[in-house]
Image (cartoon, rainbow, N blue to C red):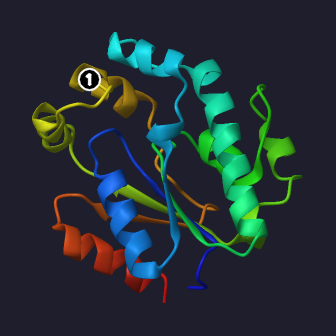
Amino acid sequence: METPGVLLVMGVSGSGKSTVGALLANKLGWKFYDADDYHSEENRIKMGKGVPLNDQDRIPWLCSLHDILLRDVASGQSVVLACSALKKMYRDILNRGGSDVPPRSDESAKEEPLAGGKFLVVHLCGSFELIYGRLLQRRGHFMPPELLQSQFSILEPPSAPENFIHISVDKGLPEIAAAVLEALK
């Protein structure tokens, strides 16, 4: 597989996106972004109150992230982004850009993808029980465990024609990183 300009590490809250993404960026020598760092204060407050985000909350955030990725890729910098990206539409916005109005499927194909299509989605997947247990142990994060079910409910796992790999989070961190690095060869 050709090395992508953007490696999107996605999954529900607690799947290990930030940890895996930072490790991969370090191993690859790529820039790392954690999408959680770019949520608006309003989104953080909403989630902190136990209210799931909707498309209207997420789309401006995703468009901002796309702009960051576009800037880096245009300058020749490969990037790892840790982002929930739970729906295909969200991944399309990250890859192709968008506006505050969700793109129709026939429109999204018209826009040029980032890095000339060098965009690999790494879906960190696991059971609700495993990930919920992780969230119960996590401290100091704005996303409460009570919102996990809402994320599983809207999750659209990557599928063809997306460029993706699924990796189970019941593996250890070294195994997960090795699987991604192998997929990049």
Of 17 and 67, nearer the camera is: 67
Residue 123 percent coordinates (x, y): 41, 57
Q: Which residue is mark 1?
A: 144
Does residue 131 lie above or below 150 as drawn?
Answer: below
Q: Residue at x 45, y 30 (%)?
A: 154
Q: Is residue 160 visible?
A: yes
Judge left or right: residue 121 versus residue 172.
right
Q: In the figure, is residue 175 to the left or right of 80?
A: left
> Quadrant of the image for the N terminus?
bottom right
Inspect this view and state whether residue 86 appears.
Answer: no
Q: How many marks?
A: 1
Residue 141, image x, y percentages: 28, 31
Q: Is residue 3 above or below residue 150?
A: below
x, y percent for residue 118: 67, 72
Instruction: In this rendered view, identify the residue nearer to me: 73 or 9.
Output: 73
Which residue is farthest bottom?
185
Q: Residues within 10 Å of mark 1 (few under 14, many from 20)?
A: many
Mark 1 element type: loop
Q: Residue at x 54, y 37 (%)?
A: 38
Tag 1: amino acid: Pro
Q: Looking at the picture, tell me which residue is in the foreground, 13 or 75.
A: 75
Considering only vertical position in the picture, is 24 above or below 93?
A: below
108 on left or right of 20:
right
Residue at (39, 85) in percent of width and height: 182
Q: Is residue 134 above or below residue 182?
A: above
Answer left or right for 129 relative to 119: left
Nearer-the-camera pick, 49 or 132: 49
Identify the residue at image location x=49%, y=82%.
184
Snapshot quadrant of residue 134? top left
